[in-house]
Image: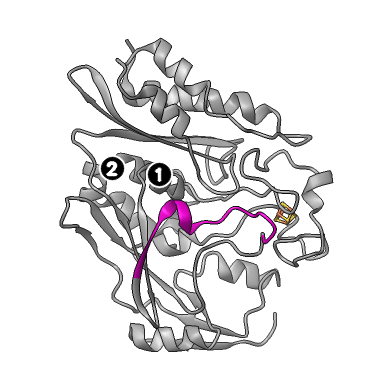
Amino acid sequence: MFPFAYTKVADTREALAAGQRGGRYIAGGTTLVDLMRETVERPEAVVDISALPLRDITTTRDGGLRIGALVRMSEAAADRQVRGAFPVISEALELSASAQLRNMATIGGNIMQRTRCTYFRDVSAACNKRRPGSGCAALDGFNRTHAILGTSSQCVATHPSDVAVAFAALEASVRLLGPGGERTVPFADFLLQPGTTPDREQALQRGELITAVEIPAHPRPLWSGYLKVRDRQSYEFALTSAAVALHVQDGVIRTAKVAAGGVGTVPWKLPAVERYLVGKRPSDALWTEAAERAADGAKPLTHNGFKVELLKRTVARQLRVVGGTR
Ligand code: SF4
């Protein structure tokens, strides 16, 4: 281990001041402490924000949901409002990590998770995300679990969060608080694709604090759910996943929200699938036809070509689970 300063703050003003001085925020600690132990991250100062009043789940004025950044994953998964309106969020959370981790990890921390790329976590390996300009060991290494969408010549790592896939599908936004006040960033703009700066992962300014994730209102009834395909049934990251939400009225799909996980450098929204579904009547054939568009633009690496077909099948299956068999 290495020396670092630890401060526990009591209010947001104190947190922002510490963040401005370069302190790293910590709440559940389930990501940052691991990375510090492995010396992948070596912050000089850690700011404990776990006592801040950001632990509520409330209904917004337009009928959406606001989930405080410090709500524990297990609390959000079990919440009556979340389960009632957006089962896709509860299911994504329940399929993540272990029960012990879900009891500690927060919603804000979950979307800030860093990649599970093994080279990123091996400080002896070349990794542009950990050490910009050092190269990418995954490009010529073992890249079976890596991304096929949103990659660059600098980085091909996937984003590991499940609930972020549900947030992307539902077109959530992230509420941020900084020295200049509050702002809202659409979820699609919050997590950044690697491009030429894979070390920059979120659209956060220095010292900004995530206060909540907001899910907009969607037409009711909204059927939704999350499917995660992985090498083993527990405590494993997604090879592919699909978050699906559908609103069907008078036998016609009026709204379709679909995103995929395990395949992109960020949670991957599937607009071509959504467009194909809207205005059509649910049917087995439709789910398969729509899912054919799920891997548009994919660029497989040496060892992960199987993800192209697996992604299409994952999306087709979850469309069928949510939209029904006809
Ligand atoms: Fe690092 Fe990204 Fe390459 Fe993994 S894929 S080694 S995180 S640069």
In the rendered structure, which segment of residues is drawn in magenta?
183-197
Rendered view: 198 above or below 35: above
Rendered residue at 66%/50% (across/down): 157
Q: Residue at x 41, y 84 (%)?
A: 15
Lower sequence index among marks 1 and 2? 2
Crowding around mark 1 (Cα neighbors within 10 Å: few <14, some 14 to 19, many 20+) is many
Q: Position of residue 52 (x, y in %)?
A: 33, 78
Q: CA distance from mark 1 to mark 2?
A: 9 Å
Residue 95 relative to residue 312: left or right: left
Ligand 1 location (quadrant): bottom right
Q: Is residue 73 above or below residue 296?
A: below
**Amino acid residing under circle 1:** Ala
The residue shown at (62%, 55%) is: 115
Q: Are marks 1 and 2 in contact (CB under 8 Å)?
A: yes
Left or right, 245 with respect to 192, comes to: left
Task: Pinpoint residue 138: horizontal percent, then vertical percent.
Answer: 78, 48
Residue designated by label 1: 166
* Residue 158 visible in image: yes
Judging by the rendered image, the residue that carries numbered circle 2 is 86
Is 83 part of what is drawn in magenta?
no
